[in-house]
Image (cartoon, rainbow, N blue to C red):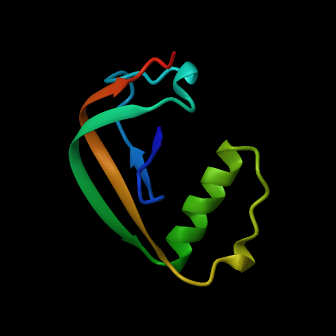
Amino acid sequence: MTLKVDNGEEINVKVRDGDMVFPMSAIGKQAYATGVLERFELDIEKTKRYLAHRAHENGEVFDASKVTEGMNLVRLKPGAVTILETQ
């Protein structure tokens, strides 16, 4: 699951399989999460692999030639996630 935060950044929420389940109906809804943030600095090759994987998951085309530098990735290991029901 990826959360978009107020400043426009994205935070990847990573859980072990079976610990938590995020339903497809949660897409586009507001969520609150608590836990531990981890920051990873990816070199250019790891950045390409990560972005290629994300593109594949989303059914998008990935052009590795457009990646010119590494990126920082922020991941949340959640203790709890609440998905709000919109009215």
Q: Is residue 42 positioned above or below 75 on the image?
A: below
Task: Single out the residue that lies furthest toward the bottom.
Answer: 68
Picture coordinates of residue 77 (x, y %)?
27, 42
46 or 76, which lies in front? 76
* Residue furthest front in the image: 87
In the rendering, at what x and y percent does residue 43 appear? 46, 78
**Where's residue 49, x and y in %?**
58, 63
Residue under the point 57% across and 20% down? 25
Q: Taking 79 as reference, is 29 left or right? A: right
Using residue 36 as the reference point, say whether residue 23 is left or right of it.
right
What count of labels does the image hold? 0
Up the image or down, 61 lies above or below 80; here it is below
Q: Position of residue 83 (x, y in %)?
A: 40, 24
In the rendered view, tell whether residue 32 sits above or below residue 68: above
- Residue shown at the point (34%, 66%) measured from the top left: 40
**Residue drawn 47% across and 43% down?**
2
Q: Nearer the viewer, residue 31 or 75?
A: 31
- Say left or right for 81 vs 43: left
Residue at horizontal 68%, vertical 53%? 55
Taking the image as shown, residue 11 lies to the left or right of residue 63, namely left
Which one is nearer the viewer's eye here, 41 or 45? 41
Q: Eyeballing the image, is 82 above or below 37?
A: above
The picture quadrant where one finds residue 58 is top right
